[in-house]
Image (spheres, helix red, strand yellow):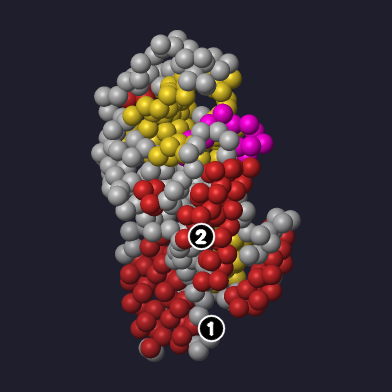
Amino acid sequence: MAMNKKEKLKILHAADLHLDSPFEGLPAGKAAVRRGEQRELLRRLAALAESEQADLVLLSGDLLDSGKPYYETGEELIRSLGRIAAPVFISPGNHDYYGAQSPYARLKLPENVHIFKTGRIEPVELKELGVRVYGAAFTENRSGPLLRGFQAPREEGTVNLLCLHGEVGVRDSAYNPIAEEELAQSGLDYAALGHVHKASGLKKAGNTWYAWPGCPEGRGFDETGEKTVNLVEMEGESCRLRPVSLAARRYEILPVDVTGTDPFLAVHAKLPDDTVRDIYRIVLTGETETAPDLKRLQANLAEFFFELQIRDETRLQRDVWDRMGDDTLRGLFLAKLRARYDAAKDEAERIRIEQAARWGLAALDNSEEVVRHEDQ
């Protein structure tokens, strides 16, 4: 029997909140602050659902970073989801997979929240909206293909939606691999996906629209820039997607060329106007006569950020090999490194060897080391 299809359907689609992430790259106190701000994401999500009058909310997995969230996180999950007037659907992912001891089984979630609990795609009908929501759960931290062979019946007056955690276009993925051909043949109108932390934008396979919103809060320097959730409007055969930012802070990487200028002035010239809430990694590049004073820079710039890392990737203007022929410890050291430099396979390896020469020369001269950090 056909349901009473609403002319325009508004969906709030979010995924990959990873509540209670460890934030290992931050000092312990600031990591705790960030976890508290993650919980506030739930309140902002509920407020957005209310202000936009969303008809339903689809949360496509990894709301939690692990199966052992803090007590406060569970309480906030109950409070915030209970404030949402619309039905809420959760499809557990690889970090928050469903099981007898999972938080979703233990928490007394509000009646408007539906958790998909099995690895089989199952439907929930919302007759008042003319919608059928399909979904499934990860039941362990990996999953084979869940959508393979699935096809929702196309019925006049019914919108078929999917809420699912998985990875599109990666055939050998251990996290529910999904092929575009499977989406095209699925009979779905919109597939709300999760797992990938960079937003996809709106995509289409056959007659099926699909997207993943990425993570709504960056958690490290591999998740830089603006992070969003999706507001999706469906009307007839059309679909529109509007990304909305709910993030409290951003991670950003700022390269600064300090050739021929004072590093402090060079950084100031490139800084955006408002960085005080954000987490920055400033990467110094270019050629310098002497190594940049990283301690001075850190002391003078730290107040402009929530947290700051400074990395030195500058190169000394002098030729580090100029005393390679000396019959000294310095000369022998440089000769060995130069042989490795000349045999290097690529430019990246040559840069690493030259950096090692700089470390060695700094130690021989009893000067401060210039540390080139590796990514966290």
* Residue in the image at 53% along x and 71% along y: 27
Circle 1 sits on which residue? Answer: 368
Whole-percent x, y for residue 66 in the image: 39, 56
Whole-percent x, y for residue 72 in the image: 51, 60
Mark 1 belongs to which amino acid? Glu
* Residue in the image at 60% along x and 66% along y: 307
Whole-percent x, y for residue 329 in the image: 38, 88
Tell me the element at label 1: loop
Tell me the element at label 2: helix
Distance from disc 2 to disc 1, alpha carbons, whole Å, reads: 45 Å
Mark 2 belongs to which amino acid? Glu
The stretch in magenta equals: 48-60
Give the side of residue 294 with respect to residue 127, left or right.
Answer: right
Q: Is residue 102 above or below residue 207?
A: below
Q: Quadrant of residue 316?
A: bottom right
The answer to whether residue 284 shows anywhere in this view is no
* Residue in the image at 54% along x and 43% along y: 82
Please tell me which of labels 2 and 1 falls first in the chain.
2
Q: Nearer the viewer, residue 328 or 62?
A: 62
Circle 2 sits on which residue? Answer: 72
